[in-house]
Image: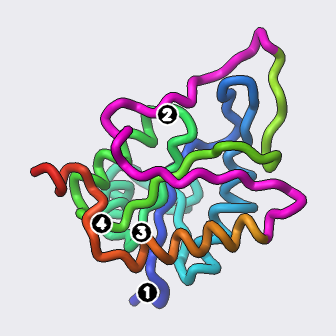
C-alpha cells in the first residue's frame, strides 16, 4: 500500500545539447522538478532511477498509467519523451503536466556556435496543449520551486480533461 500519490516524471536524462546550450537535465530534476513535486505531496519517480531489474517496458507502461500525475518535460523534441507522453494521453484523461525550460541558469552551459543542439520547436501535434514554462535561477531557486509546486497542485487538483486523445475521441 502506498502512502503518497505518485508523480512520474518523463524527461531527458543527463546532459543534452539544446540549441545554444548544454542542459544537464539531471540537475533540473534533482534541484527543481523533484523537490517541487515532493513539496506538493508526491512520491517522485523517474524510470532511469528505478532499481528493479528485468524488462523496462512493462514497468514503464504501468508507471505511466498508474501515476496520479505525469510531468513531461518537452524542452526539446526528444523521441522518448514524446512517445511516453503519447502513451499517457492515450491511457489517462487527466493528470498530465507539460513543462518546458524557457530560461534560467540552473544546469546550463553555453555551447560554441559550431556545436548547436536540438531545436526547441514544439511538435505540431501538441501545439494546442497547455505548456507551463520554467526558468529556474540559482539565485532564486526556492521561489521558482515554490511557483512550480503551486502549478503541480493546480494540475493535480483539476478535474478537467487534459488529454487531447480523450478530448477529441
Residue identified by numbered label 3: 69
Who is closer to the viewer here, 14 or 124? 124
Residue for point 29% across, 76% down: 159
State which region is magenta: 113-142
Q: Is residue 123 above or below residue 159?
A: above
The percent coordinates of residue 72 (x first, y second) are 47, 52
Residue identified by numbered label 4: 94
- Residue 20, magenta (yes or no): no
Residue for point 52% across, 70% down: 152
Q: Of callouts 4 and 2, which one flags the residue occurring earlier in the amino acid sequence?
A: 2
CA gap, disc 1 to disc 3? 15 Å
Q: Is residue 150 above or below residue 166?
A: below
Disc 3 is placed on an element classified as strand
Q: Which disc is residue 78 wearing?
A: 2
CA gap, disc 2 to disc 3? 20 Å
Q: Of callouts 4 and 3, which one flags the residue occurring earlier in the amino acid sequence?
A: 3
Residue identified by numbered label 1: 2
Q: Of callouts 1 and 3, which one flags the residue occurring earlier in the amino acid sequence?
A: 1
Residue 112 appears left or right of 92: right
Q: Of callouts 2 and 3, which one flags the residue occurring earlier in the amino acid sequence?
A: 3
In the image as oriented, which residue stretches furthest toward the top? 114
Quadrant location of residue 83?
A: top left
Disc 1 is placed on an element classified as loop
Q: Nearer the viewer, mark 1 or mark 3?
A: 3
Amino acid at each position: 500500500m502506498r502512502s503518497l500519490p505518485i508523480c512520474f516524471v518523463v524527461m531527458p536524462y543527463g546532459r543534452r545539447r539544446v540549441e545554444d546550450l548544454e542542459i544537464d537535465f539531471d540537475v533540473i530534476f534533482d534541484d527543481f522538478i523533484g523537490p517541487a513535486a515532493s513539496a506538493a505531496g508526491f512520491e517522485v519517480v523517474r524510470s532511469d532511477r528505478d532499481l528493479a531489474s528485468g524488462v523496462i517496458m512493462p514497468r514503464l507502461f504501468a508507471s505511466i498509467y498508474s501515476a496520479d500525475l505525469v510531468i513531461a518535460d518537452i524542452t526539446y523534441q526528444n523521441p522518448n519523451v514524446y512517445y511516453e507522453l503519447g502513451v499517457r494521453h492515450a491511457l489517462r484523461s487527466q493528470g498530465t503536466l507539460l513543462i518546458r525550460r524557457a530560461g534560467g541558469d540552473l544546469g546550463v552551459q553555453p555551447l560554441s556556435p559550431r556545436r548547436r543542439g536540438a531545436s526547441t520547436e514544439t511538435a505540431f501535434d501538441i501545439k494546442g496543449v497547455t505548456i507551463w514554462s520554467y526558468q529556474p535561477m540559482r539565485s532564486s531557486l526556492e521561489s521558482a520551486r515554490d511557483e512550480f509546486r503551486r502549478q503541480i497542485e493546480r494540475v493535480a487538483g483539476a478535474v478537467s480533461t487534459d488529454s487531447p486523445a480523450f478530448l477529441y475521441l
